[in-house]
Image (spheres, rainbow, N blue to C red):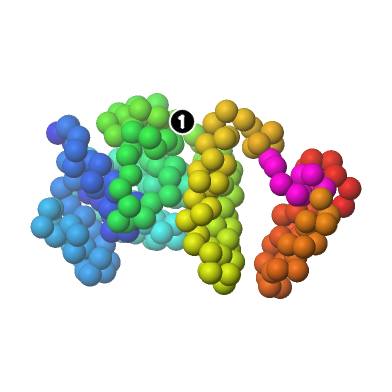
Amino acid sequence: MKSIVLFGAGNVATHLFRAFAEIEDYEVIQVYNHREKSLEFFKEKVPVTTDFTEVFPADIYLFALKDEAISLLADRVHYRDALMLHTSGATPLAAFESFEKAGVFYPLQTFSKNKPVDFKEIPICIEAKNESQLKMTEQLALKISPAVYKINSEQRRSLHVAAVFVSNFVNFLYSQGEQICRQNKIPFEILHPLIKETALKIKNLSPFDAQTGPAKRGDSDVINEHLGLLNEDQKTIYNLLTNSIKKLHGKEL
């Protein structure tokens, strides 16, 4: 049985803890977080601490923290036999440069603490300092997901940017659509089937081929009508995206 100390108590840490609780051969033996209040979920399930001097020795130290905290906390680790892993998409493996055993364990998904996820459908991107450590990281990843990808730090930086475009930015656009609906007393749920179909479509088509709408058609009458319905911030976003789609699909600006 390999032991894991989990650093962090946010969305990613919570979902990983739940996933590890369902598998054999690995056990989370402790959770560390600097804020005691954030540890409430874990207290009845596993030993917890806010004191770094109380961190247990373990086979794996898994850092599910904000990017800027990873190196700062890792440098305080005195037990050097553990395999150091972090879950960040934007932080390079070099964050653990002072450790002999280190890697990356990056689950590529958006996590909300109270929204269940199925790790069997979540890609996990891994990296390590050498083949032996990569194998150890892969063995852990395969325990919770069949979709494990060997992605180096440079690739992961680009992948993280791509993920921001297809998730965070898209979700922001959902919020703008919801705002427009509410202002006009329209239930946002009307758009749910459209959102679902748009997402499903790219499983069979490239996003380029799946593009529809007035910008792709170059329908200036509809575009101008839409602009008249928007506030200034929304107009800026609408124009930027419309012009980008026109450029991509060869329409005159």
Could you tell me which residue is drawn at 33 percent across and 33 percent down?
120
Q: Work out whether residue 44 can be spotted.
A: yes
- State the image quarter where residue 42 is shown: bottom left
Quadrant in which the N terminus appears? top left
Q: Residue furthest left?
A: 44
The percent position of residue 152, horizontal first and vertical second, equals 51, 36
Question: Helix or strand or loop: what does disc 1 sit on?
Answer: strand
The residue positioned 28% from the left and 58% from the top of the image is 9
Q: Nearer the viewer, residue 144 or 103?
A: 144
The relative height of residue 178 versus residue 30 in the rendered view (above or below) is below
Segment colored magenta: 211-218
Who is closer to the viewer here, 190 or 104?
190
Whether residue 214 appears in magenta in the rendering, the answer is yes
Q: Amino acid at mark 1?
A: Lys
Figure check: 38 above or below 155 = below
Left or right: 146, with 28 as reference point = right
Instruction: State the residue position of label 1.
Output: 150
Where residue 49 sits: x, y (%)? 18, 62
The residue at 33%/38% (across/down) is 119
User: Considering depth in this image, is 193 or 41 the residue closer to the camera?
Assistant: 193
Q: Is residue 183 magenta?
A: no
Q: Total marks drawn?
A: 1
Is residue 136 visible to the viewer in this orientation of the structure? no
Residue 114, percent across and down?
Answer: 30, 56
Query: Image height check: is 150 above or below 153?
Result: above
Q: Residue furthest front?
A: 185
Q: Residues within 10 Å of mark 1 (few under 14, many from 20)?
A: some
Camera-side residue of 41 and 56: 41
* Left or right, 3 with reference to 173: left
Q: Is residue 10 above or below residue 26?
A: below
Residue 34: give x, y in percent of width and height.
Answer: 27, 66
Instruction: Please report the residue visible at 25 percent of the width from the left and 42 percent of the height from the top.
Output: 19
